[in-house]
Amino acid sequence: MDSFELNKIIGAVLLTALIVIGIGKFTDILFHVEKPEQAAYKVEGLEVATSSTASETSEKIVEVVDIKALLAMGDLAHGEKVFKKCSACHMIAAGGKNMIGPNLWSVIGRTAGSVNDYKYSKAMVAYGKEWTFEEMNSYLIKPQAYIKGTKMAFAGLRKEKDRASVILYMNSKGNNPKPLP
């Protein structure tokens, strides 16, 4: 193939590109659409996210939940099904071994980060609160957001019924289950 044929191919590709771009520009002029000044559908309750500076103190906003009403939504059988998501990393058996996460036997009522033969993240050890029904509910919504720096890479349980059921299931799996509030 000589250079003349190569020039014809390159010229044809360029001409095609120019024609496509030209048609696009021409149709923009021909079918000009003005955007409305106001949106036709306005979403209420949206707030603009602001970034905080290092000097500002960040406060954890804890949503107040009626734990009695939440736990009333739960079901042990449903909790056992939902716990299968957790069983990829956690075991819940008396004398069970730690897996990627610690054994959750008798977790309700236990201090966070207190299983001796498990290496917790520094954030979890520093957290050190007792796992109550309320704490577990808040944690299970989104663990990474609730305890910043935890190594638990779980997205969380968004549905209230799922969280309530898992909490009831975990409470039932212990040496002495805590009485429901």
Image (spheres, rainbow, N blue to C red):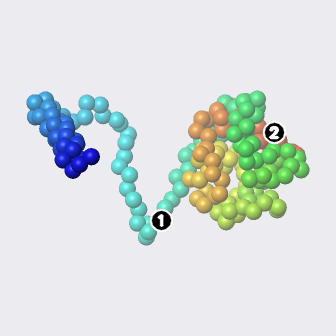
Position of 172 compared to 120: left or right? right
Q: Quadrant of residue 77?
A: top right
Give the mark nearest the N terminus, 1 or 2: 1
Query: Where in the figure is residue 19, as x and y percent of width and height?
Result: 16, 37
At 66% from the left and 30% from the top, the residue drawn is: 73
At 78% from the left and 52% from the top, the residue drawn is: 99
At 61% from the left and 35% from the top, the residue drawn is: 160
Q: Amino acid at mark 2?
A: Ser
* Residues at marks 1 and 2, CA–CA distance in whole angstroms: 39 Å
Q: Residues within 10 Å of mark 1 (few under 14, many from 20)?
A: few
Residue 102 seen by the camera: yes
The disc placed on residue 76 is none
Q: Amino acid at mark 1?
A: Thr
Q: Quadrant of the C terminus?
A: top right
Query: Where in the figure is residue 167, as x and y percent of width and height?
Result: 72, 40
Query: Where in the figure is residue 136, as x and y percent of width and height?
Result: 68, 47
Residue 180 seen by the camera: no
Q: Is residue 7 above or below residue 125?
A: above
Residue of label 1: 57
Q: Are marks 1 and 2 in contact (CB under 8 Å)?
A: no
The one nearer the camera, 177 or 106, is 106
Secondary structure beneath dot 1 equals: loop
Position of 135 compared to 80: left or right? left
Residue of label 2: 172
Query: Where in the figure is residue 120, as x and y percent of width and height?
Result: 72, 61
Position of 132 compared to 7: left or right? right
Secondary structure beneath dot 2 equals: helix
The number of numbered badges drawn on the structure is: 2
The one nearer the camera, 17 or 171, is 17
Q: Residue extending furthest bottom?
A: 55
